[in-house]
Every structure is written in C-alpha cells, then in structure tokens.
Image (tube, rainbow, N blue to C red):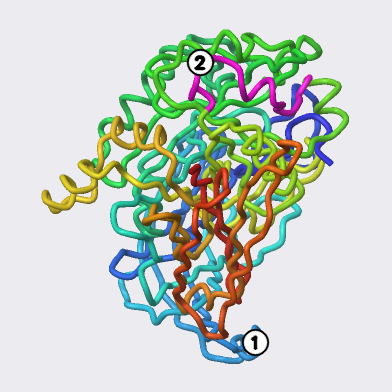
Amino acid sequence: MDFLFRDKPRYAESHYKFRLPWSPLFHRCPEIIVDAPFQIVPGEAFPFWIAVRDADRFPVRLERLRLSFRRQSPGESRAESASQRPTSFEYKLNISANESLAFYPAQVTDKLNPGFYEIFAELDVTCRGKKGIIRNRNLPGLSKEPLRVQVLGEVPPKPVGYIACETHCHTHISADPVEFGAFPDVLQKAARAIGLDAVFCTDHSYDFAFESPDYMRPTDGELRYRALQKEISELPEYPRMIAGEEVSAGNAEGRNVHLLLPGTSAYVPGLGDCGRNWLRNHPTLPLTEILPHLGTPAFAAHPEERMSAAERGVFRRGNWSHGDLAAGAPLNVRGMQFWNGSRDAGFTAGRALWIRELLRGARLLPIGGNDAHGDLNAYTGVKVPLFKLKINRNHVFGYVRTVIQMPGETATRAAQNGSPAHSEKEILSAFRGDNLYVTDGPALWWTRAAGGIEFTAQSTADYGALKTVRIFGACKNGNGEASEKEISVPVDAGTYKLSEIIPAVDYIYLRAECETSQGRFALTSAAFL
C-alpha cells in the first residue's frame, strides 16, 4: 500500500528523504535503468536507453554494456528458451554521466526474427572510485528480471484513416519526491518503434508549479508549461507529440479528481493533491470553473481508480460521478480514460460507469492510456515511501492505445501527401467525432452500413486468433428504461478477421468488444443510431 503518495506507475525516485536523516532506499549512486520499448513493429529500429537519474549528485562512469537476447518461439516454454544459446551484443560506452537526468541512447542494428525476447543487460560502471556491474537496474530491493520485448512479424492491424494514440503519459516535468519521467524525444522515438502515431504528454498540473529537482520550491507553472510546449515543438512532426496537462480539479464533493487536457493553450493550475501542503489539500479550481472555458476536448482520467484510505483522507482524492461528467459546456468532458494500462478493478468499475452514462444518453468516448512515467518496458515505482519499491509489467508506455478515425478530408489529404503526420489541431478535432476503439492488440471498429452498423474485428499471429467477439445493443423496455443486451457472434477457431452487420432496428446504440487467444482485448466507442 502506498501510504503517502498515489500508487501510480513511475520511474522511482529513491534519493529523496523528506529531510529525514535516513532511508533504506537511499544509496550514493545514481538511479540507473536499462530500458527499451515493449514491442518493435516491422521496419522500425530497435532503440534502447540507459536512464540515469541524479548523476549531478553522484557522478558515474558508464564503461561498457552487454546485452544477451533469448528468443521464445510460439508454443515454446521459458525453460526451453533458456536452454538455447543467446544472441549477444556489446557496446563500448565510456560515458561520464554527471547530469540530474539523462537518457543515453543506442540501438540494435541486427534484424531479429519475430517473437518474444528476454533481454539481460549488464552495465559496467565506476561510481565513487569503485567498479561494479549493474544488471538491468540498480534500484534497491527490486529483482533483476530481464526486459521483455516482442518483435512483431506484422504491422499491428489498423483500418485505413485511423491513427493510434497514447493519451496519457508523463515527461521529465512530472518529477516529485517519489517519481520522474522521460524526455519527450525519448518518448517520440519509442512511440515510433511500437507503432504509435500521436502521444499526449499530460504532466501533473502541480508538478509544473514546482522546481525540479528542488521539488518543494514553488515556481511559475505557466512558464514551465510554455517550456514544455517549446521543447515538443522542436521535435520532428511524426509521431505527433502534444503537450498537455493532467489537472487536479475539484469534483462535486470538493474532492480532487484528475482531468486530462491534451493541447490546452494555457496552463491550468491544480495543486489540490500535490503532496507539498501536508493537510491543506482542497482543490485549486472546481471542474465547473475549468470545463466551460476549454477550447480542446477533455477526458476524465482513471475515473474509478481504487485508492487507499490515506489518499482519500489526506489528499482528499475522489472519484468521478455523473454530475462531474455532465459539468460544463457540451462535449467538454469528451471521454473517460477508464482503461489505464491494465484491466484491473478500476477498469471494470470505470467501464460500468461509462455504460451507465451511455444508457443515460451521454455520448462519451472510451479512452485508453497508460499513465506511464517513462517506463517503456516495465514500471518501477514507490510502494512505501522511504522503505519499499515495486516493479511489474502494467502501465507500460504505449501498451494500451486509443485508435481514432480521422475526418475523411484529413485522412485523404495525409494519404495524398504521402505523410502519416497529422497536425495537433486535426488530431484533437478528431476526438469531437464518435468513432474510435481502444486496444492492447487487435483492431475492432465499426462503420455505418445501410440499415445498420457493420463491426469488423482483426488480429494477427503476433496477438493471437480471435477468440470472442461480443456486440452489445442498448434498447428501452416497456417502462422506457434503457439497458444493454448481448448479440451473439460465433467465432470459428483460427479466425483472424471477422465482420458482422447488425440491423439498427430498435437500438439506441451498438458497441463491441473482442478478445484473442493470447488474451489481447479491444472495445469500440458506441455507435448511436
């Protein structure tokens, strides 16, 4: 349980002691993590980085890096894979690291066969005059488990005219006593490797308002937000990087909820649960003051996230409700990011809230993101501040993607120009539409056909054959109450693509979900009729 700070994915900050004399996590060496994207699409380079944090306080020399790749073929056990001779790469570095945060890049130039790879990294370092070997990461108390990367044999399925987005991630701006993030250029290169077209960099509103690395010193949040906008504007146009915020705002109960604002032109303050004010954790601004004045779509972030008693009691954190989602001008709360990196209890409760809102007539979009603070391959975070860290494979950058249909003229123009890049304005405008799906693998989309809605599900050998396709239709009973019913769709074994047309008679809306034999999942927005 995270007693002091929200239990979220993050690169772990272990050197901050809250002005206490001692912490079992503290060690006089920078935090070092060897990181790489979780998957590589065909035709893209295989990048990886050595992330080094706090080397300005604890200088280190990176001497040499060795990588050992073990491939696990389909149907092969991990024990069988471990018995095979690994493929090895070695890099002579000779890097003197002395910055507060740096990502030192490299890449695998050899062509690797499709499959899952376990990557064991050994990094020779010299810190405080002593030589040592770091295996994958040097964060105290964490296992040395390898990186896991899937080299895809096929490009992830996606219909023509759609783009894949990471809608919730954090950069180096989101740094405080328990976490930090990655630079936008690192996220952009990783995004290209895994097959993303756009990334929303949604840093905490409260982190803009404090210095880094002096996390407790207030500063001008507007200036820091403009600096992030400038940093992102200087990057290549593809994948499109969009600066934004995750704003802490007040719900109807006066508690702090999080609001994603991609592409907002000006900084929106929100210090309510920043952790710097001890028990003074009332929201800076309520949703009702923020939402009516926005020029871009906004999303409710992890609306039904499970939280500890300390988070509710000390930081006054709360959940989203119907009243909160209906606040402000129409379409200002455009969607709910209830798929937050994993299909956990928060996902289940968030999806149920979304369905209740659909049945009320609210045309809210389902949004998927990962809330990753860097964390390209696995996330490392603080479990108990000062005492214990954690690591798992959830909340990895780009793993859950929101795939949205671009307006017809926009998609056509991009195709004619031979460029996959869309402008920030075009991408944000697409979220004013109603056609998208959220996925960690297969594609699942709908099109309006004569007299009904056609649903198409498509997967690849990388993600597994289709196992189930479920279509849900909302209709009213004799009392005028709306509810969903499931429409059966048979799926033959070994099916990788399936289409089904559902007549529109008597339905308020239709939506679909699918799952593959490898447990990959997708769901669509609601097609209102």
Give the SS element for disc 2: loop
Is 249 rendered above or below residue 398?
above
- Residue that numbered label 1 is attached to: 77
Chain-order first, disc 1 or disc 2: 1
Of tags 1 and 2, the one toward the viewer is 2
Is 324 rendered above or below residue 400?
above
Magenta-colored span: 316-333
- Residue that numbered label 2 is attached to: 329
19 lies left or right of 341: right
Q: Quadrant of residue 499?
A: bottom left
The residue positioned 67% from the left and 87% from the top of the image is: 79
Question: Could you tell me the amino acid type at mark 1?
Answer: Ser
Q: Position of residue 250 (x, y in %)?
A: 68, 15
- Principal secondary structure, stretch drawn in magenta: loop
Q: Position of residue 406 (x, y in %)?
A: 31, 44
How many numbered dots are placed on residues in this image?
2
Q: Residues within 10 Å of mark 2 (few under 14, many from 20)?
A: few
| Discs 1, 2 touching: Cβ within 8 Å | no
The residue positioned 57% from the left and 48% from the top of the image is: 507
Residues 210 and 77: in front is 77
